[in-house]
Amino acid sequence: MLGFVPKGYGQFYKYSNEFLAIGVGARGLALGGAVTSSSHDVTAAYWNPAGLPSGPPNLDIGLMHAEYFAGIAKYDYGAVALPMQEGLLNRKLAFSLIRFGVDDIPNTLFLIEPDGSINYDNISNFSVADYAALISYGQETGVEGLQVGGSLKIIHRIAGSFASSWGLGADLGVQYLKNGWQFGAIGRDITTTFNAWSYHFTSEEQMVLATTNNLIPENSIELTAPRLVAGASRVFTFGQQQTFTVMPALDLDVTFDGRRNTLIRTGLISMDPRLGVEGGYKKTIYLRAGLNNFQRITQLDGSTDLTVQPSAGVGLSIKSVIIDYALTNLGDLSGSLYSHVFSLRLSLGAAKKS
């Protein structure tokens, strides 16, 4: 259970804080995460806060629930975006909360009594959970179509009463919108995000760990290296009244922390492409599909197969209520375990005139 705990001080970990790489909102997940350039609602606080100003001019609320590994792990998200009408430039402030956790894990440290007998009454339960609070801000600039934004991330991770950490990081993004074209880029963890771990074992727990040849971890710092996500999309309209829309999108997720099992990889960078397409009818009904997580898997015979994670979804927008659904292969590359993701967005009230 405690094998995940980092050991040492100030170390970079290739997959540190990976719960923040999952994504939020069924729209973004259905599009395979290829939304860095096209996120303009409350979920832009996560995908690219520079997109917040071009979203709904009202109070925007977003909620999502998803489950991993046949319901063993729960993934929840809630956010609110507030319009700020001072001055001539549109701007928005957003607050987001993310939780990824596994609950009701049996603690069997004291299952066996000192005399060797088994006492099931000594079993208790605990949770392992990752939390992130995002404070995001985005605004227009003096250049037409150019928007900038950023997020401050406060991270808290717990493993029952045994371990906990606090961390801090920041993202910085930009979007440029022109004649149907949308370009976006976000630098994640640009300050190098850290998690300061501390451990809280009682003397009895330390004795059990030592007796069973388990390492007793020490307080340490876990570092998350910066990464860059850049993308582009284009909205095509059809029909006399622009009844139909089609938006293809491409994102590139670039990491600099060593070679990863991605489609494009060198000794310096690893690059994971994300592809998505969204079709809309009268800005009311949407159909979506995406591809991401391209990986080369080595088989037992030494051959290599290319795998990909597909996703699909639908969206329904009725006045101020937007309901999105995604069918996506969360947490399993074999393709045998799919997850159903639902998210809800509410746009409440009218923005006040400045």
Image: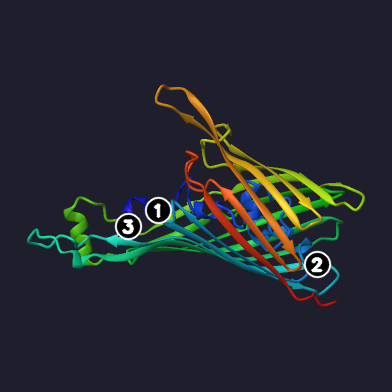
Residue 177: % across, % down? 82, 52
Residue 257: % across, % down? 53, 42
As drawn, is 181 to the left or to the right of 154? right
34 shown above or below 260: below
Along the viewing direction, whichever of 342 and 109 lies nearer the viewer: 342
Task: Indicate the amino acid at tag 3.
Answer: Glu
Q: Are marks 3 and 1 in contact (CB under 8 Å)?
A: no
Q: Closer to the N terminus: mark 1 or mark 2?
A: 1
| SS category of the residue bearing label 3 | loop
| SS category of the residue bearing label 1 | loop
Residue 144 found in image quarter: bottom right
The residue tagged 3 is 218
Residue 268: % across, % down? 57, 35
The residue tagged 2 is 90
Task: Choose mark 3 or mark 2, whichever is in front.
Answer: 2
Residue 165 found in image quarter: bottom left
| SS category of the residue bearing label 2 | loop
Q: Closer to the N terminus: mark 3 or mark 1?
A: 1
In the image, which disc is placed on residue 48? none
Q: Does residue 200 show up?
A: no
Q: Residue visible at 77% across and 58% down? A: 284
The residue tagged 1 is 9
Along the viewing direction, whichever of 316 and 114 lies nearer the viewer: 316
**Residues packed near mark 2 inside 10 Å, few (<14), some (14 to 19) or many (20 plus):** some
Q: Closer to the N terminus: mark 3 or mark 2?
A: 2
Q: Does residue 178 show up?
A: yes
Q: Residue furthest right?
A: 240
Label 3, label 1: how many angstroms apart (C-alpha)?
9 Å
Task: Indicate the amino acid at tag 1.
Answer: Tyr
